[in-house]
Amino acid sequence: MRIDKVIEMQLQTSRKEMKRLFAKGLVCVNGQMIRNQAFNVDSHLHQLTVNGQLIEWYERYWLVNKPAGYVTANHDKVAPTIFDLFDPKDFSEGLYAVGRLDRDTEGLVLVTSNGPLGFQLLHPTKKVEKIYQVRVNARLTSDDVRAFATGIVFHGGVQCQPAKLVLQVCHEKESWALVSLSEGKFHQVKKMFLACGKKVTFLKRIAFGPLKLRGLPVGGYRPLASAELEQLRPFIEGGRSNATVSSAIV
């Protein structure tokens, strides 16, 4: 969360009062004075003090293994949502899913209260890799691998960025593979295979940036480990916007 928003929320300051705290050099993160009001801080990674007073707040991070049939939304009038998987004690207002998976797609979804993190992970310039396990209804070949590596062209002329297709098991009427890509076009994986004349019959996201399912059962969820939060630190801190001060934050 932006440091100015945390201060306003926790200290109930006016905007003018909050700016004065920065101007006087009274805001510190991990012992280092911060003047950048847009710096993104996280309760798990940063210690925030204002005029020597420790400011406490709590960001939430959950890794969910979404089942097929559930939608990636906070509310839906027809289908169950990923938030229906949560025990009431683990749910809190302000949680949202970073990105979406189709209703019939399984796999990894990051749920968090940290809005800036989602923006960073999904921004096209960040090129965050996503890995999917795929089953299609035909034999995949080396021609398909080359087509993915070149950049699939959809029907209509839209071209995708190069992606990596790794063949696993290939039979005449069914094949399994892994797809790695860093884009997020609508129904992209399914459309890529359709452009090659194959239909996806199973799709599961198994990795999103540094995050991996690692044996999490379908329908299950867990909090992020401290090591995973450290891997997300560049995105949590906001990349270039924090570059002038992040080197001092350890």
Image: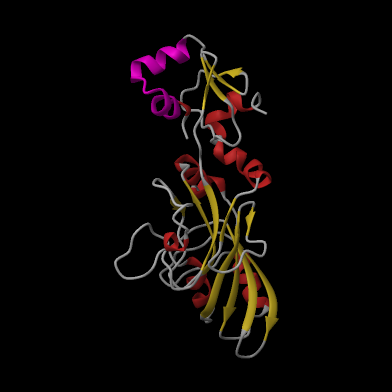
Does the magenta segment cover residue 8? yes
Question: Which residue is at a point 53% across and 67% down the rendered structure image?
Answer: 219
Viewer-closest of 189 and 40: 40
Instruction: Look at the image and tell me in which quarter the C terminus lies.
Output: top right
97 shown above or below 201: above
Q: How many marks?
A: 0
Our reading of the magenta stretch's main secondary structure is helix
Measured as percent of width and height from the top left, residue 211 is found at: 62, 54
Give the vertical position of 90 relative to 163 (above or below): above
Looking at the image, which residue sits at the far front? Answer: 89
* Residue 39 x %, y %: 51, 28
Colouring scheme applied when the structure was drawn:
secondary structure
Q: How far across and how far down the image is residue 74, in percent?
A: 37, 57
Horizontal and vertical percent position of residue 161:
55, 59
Looking at the image, which is closer to me, 88 or 35? 88
Compared with 20, 70 (above or below) is: below
| Quarter of the image where one finds residue 134 | bottom right
Query: From the viewer's perspective, is residue 175 above or below residue 124?
Result: below
Q: Is residue 65 magenta?
A: no
Range drawn in magenta: 4-23
Quarter of image, res 163: bottom right
Residue 140 position by quadrant: bottom right
Name the residue at the bottom extreme.
172
Residue farthest along the left direction in this orientation: 77
Q: Is residue 249 left or right of residue 96?
A: right
Q: Residue at x 57, y 41 (%)?
A: 235
Instruction: Identify the residue at image location x=60%, y=49%.
Output: 224
